Amino acid sequence: MIKQVIEVVLLMLFSAVKFLFSPGVVAARGFNWFQTVLITTVGGWLGVFVFFYFGKILTELWFRFRRKRA
């Protein structure tokens, strides 16, 4: 059970980073159509939220760094 949960979480993380390739990888791991759509969709949305907020923090740090150098 725990191994399956870890596998799904890792596949969601993969979907968050490489959404284009994740449906094929999830399907190749033996998940059915509905599970593949669910895992890749949740992973993709997690990626959107994480990268959106992480990108905002990086942008703020970049502008602070640039102001100090100028």
Image (cartoon, rainbow, N blue to C red):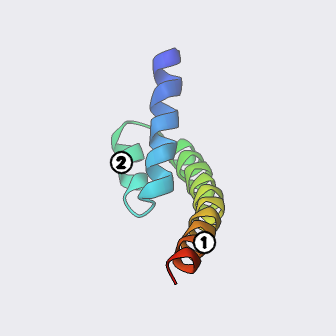
Q: Which residue is mark 2?
A: 25
Q: Position of residue 56 (x, y in %)?
A: 64, 67
Q: Position of residue 54 (x, y in %)?
A: 60, 59
Q: Position of residue 39 (x, y in %)?
A: 55, 45
The amino acid beneath tag 1 is Arg
Secondary structure under the numbered disc 1 in the rendered image: helix
Q: Which residue is mark 1?
A: 64
Q: Is residue 29 left or right of residue 49?
A: left
Q: Mark 1, residues whose alpha carbon is within 10 Å: few (<14), some, or many (≥20)?
A: few
The amino acid beneath tag 2 is Val
Q: Toward the viewer: 42 or 67?
A: 67
Assess whether mark 1 and mark 2 are in contact (beta carbons under 8 angstroms): no
Q: Position of residue 59 (x, y in %)?
A: 59, 71
| Residue ID at (63%, 65%) | 52
| Residue ID at (47%, 52%) | 15
Residue 21: name its quadrant. bottom left
Residue 15 sits above or below residue 67 on the image: above
Residue 21 sits above or below residue 60 on the image: above
Q: Toward the viewer: 59 or 44?
A: 59
How many numbered discs? 2
As drawn, the label of residue 47 is none
Q: Residue furthest top?
A: 1
Q: Toward the viewer: 14 or 33?
A: 14
Residue 6 sits above or below residue 67 on the image: above
Q: Mark 2, residues whose alpha carbon is within 10 Å: few (<14), some, or many (≥20)?
A: some
Residue 62 sits above or below residue 37 on the image: below
Q: Toward the viewer: 61 or 51?
A: 61
Secondary structure under the numbered disc 2 in the rendered image: helix
| Residue ID at (62%, 52%) | 46
What separation in Å lies between label 2 and label 1 (alpha carbons)?
Answer: 40 Å
Q: Residue furthest bottom?
A: 70
